[in-house]
Amino acid sequence: MHSSDPADADVNRAPLVNHELEIAMPKFVIEREIPGAGQLSERDLKAISQKSNKVLSKLGPQVQWLQSYVTGDKVYCVYIAPNEEMVLEHARQGEFPANRVSQITAVIDPTTAE
């Protein structure tokens, strides 16, 4: 099934409205090595999220945190940002590890096979 929605045309970029212009921004996956991440309490995760949001508010709307996946000893975060340097700046200011930053080039799911 083909979508005529322009937003579906480039799944590795997300629209970001800036000064009334729609600009496509790259998405990144950040791998953060955090020993014991999977054992962090809800309170700990909330505090980390609040710290991240505080840094994001300083960096401005061009850097957006979409979601994170917490595993045993790592956290994988998905961000929209103009470039890798802005992702790393967020990590630096928040004192978060950013062991690997990879730009997303495509997104696939079960419907890709259709």
Image (cartoon, grey):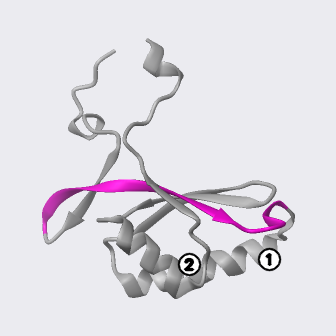
On screen, residue 78 above or below 56: above
How many other residues sit within 10 Å of disc 2, few (<14), some (14-19) or many (≥20)? some
On screen, residue 6 above or below 111: below
Q: Secondary structure at mark 2?
A: helix
Residue found 42% across the figure and 83% down from its top: 57
Residue 71, given in percent of the width and then of the height, sits at 76, 54
Q: Secondary structure at mark 1?
A: helix
Residue found 19% across the figure and 58% down from its top: 23
Magenta part of the chain: 20-38
Counting residues from the N terminus, which is met first, the one under dot 2 or under dot 1? 1
Residue found 78% across the figure and 77% down from its top: 44
Report which residue position mark 1 lands on. Answer: 43
| Residue 52 badge | 2
- Relative to 101, is 58 on the left or the right? left
What secondary structure is the magenta-colored segment mainly? Answer: strand
Q: Amino acid at mark 1?
A: Arg
Residue 20, given in percent of the width and then of the height, sits at 13, 66
